[in-house]
Amino acid sequence: MPRRHTLSRMVDYFEDIEVGVRRELGSYRMSDDEIKEFAEQYDPLPIHTDAELASRSRHEGVIASGFHTFAATNRIVTENFKSNLAVIAGLGIDDLRWYNPVRPEDTLTAEMEVLEKRTSESDPNRGIFRLDVTASNQDGDDVISFVDTGMVEVRETP
C-alpha cells in the first residue's frame, strides 16, 4: 500500500536512498557575531566569546565552539539532503571528531556518503540510513566528521 507523507512537496523515501552515493552538499559561512552568540548561550568559554583573551590563547583568536561547528554542518546536511526525505527521526551521531578550529568568516563545505541502509527490524514501514559526513574550511582543511544515523519512511509496505 502506498504511503503518504504529510509534507506538501515531493519527498524521497527509503527506496530512493542509494548506498555509496557521495555528494558535496553546500556551504555555510561562520560569522564572528554568530560564533560569539552561540558560545555565549551554549559554550561560554573565553576562546569562543572574548577576542582579547582568545588572542592570548594557543589559537591566537576566537574560534567556534565544536558544537556550533556540528550544528552548522548539520544544517548543511539537513537543507541539502534530509529536507528532501520523509524523515521520521534522527537516531544518533557516532564517531564525532573535530580536526581544526573554525574561525570567524570561515566557510564550511560539507560532503556526505551514504554508508548503508536497511529496513527497521521492529517496523517494516521504517528504514534506517547511515551517512558519513565531513566538513572542510575554505582552505580544504577538514574541520569535523561524524556518522549520522536516521530513520525514514518506506514508500510501500512489503
Image (spheres, grey):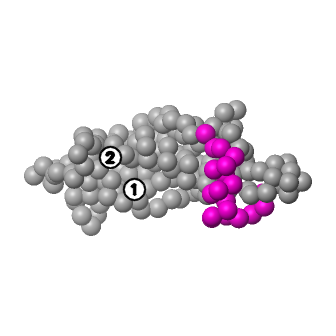
Q: Name the residue tied to disc 2.
A: 85
Identify the residue at horizontal 32%, vertical 58% (top origin). 88
Tag of residue 89: none
| Mark with earlier residue (1, 2) | 2
Secondary structure type for disc 2: loop
Q: Residues within 10 Å of mark 2 (few under 14, many from 20)?
A: some
Work out how far the residue at label 1 is from the one at label 2, CA to CA, in angstroms: 10 Å
Residue projecting furthest to the right? 56
For this rendering, which residue is in front, 86 or 158? 86
The stretch in magenta equals 29-47
Identify the residue at horizontal 33%, vertical 43% (top origin). 84
Question: Is residue 92 something one can see in this rendering?
Answer: yes
Name the residue type under label 1. Gly
Residue projecting furthest to the left? 1
How far from the left and from the top, in percent, is residue 121? 28, 63
How far from the left and from the top, in percent, is residue 21? 42, 36
Q: Is residue 134 above or below residue 36?
A: above
- Is 100 displayed left or right of 27 in the figure? right
Q: Residues within 10 Å of mark 1 (few under 14, many from 20)?
A: some
Cβ–Cβ below 8 Å for labels 1 and 2?
Answer: yes
Residue projecting furthest to the bottom? 122
Secondary structure type for disc 1: strand
Identify the residue at horizontal 39%, vertical 47% (top origin). 82
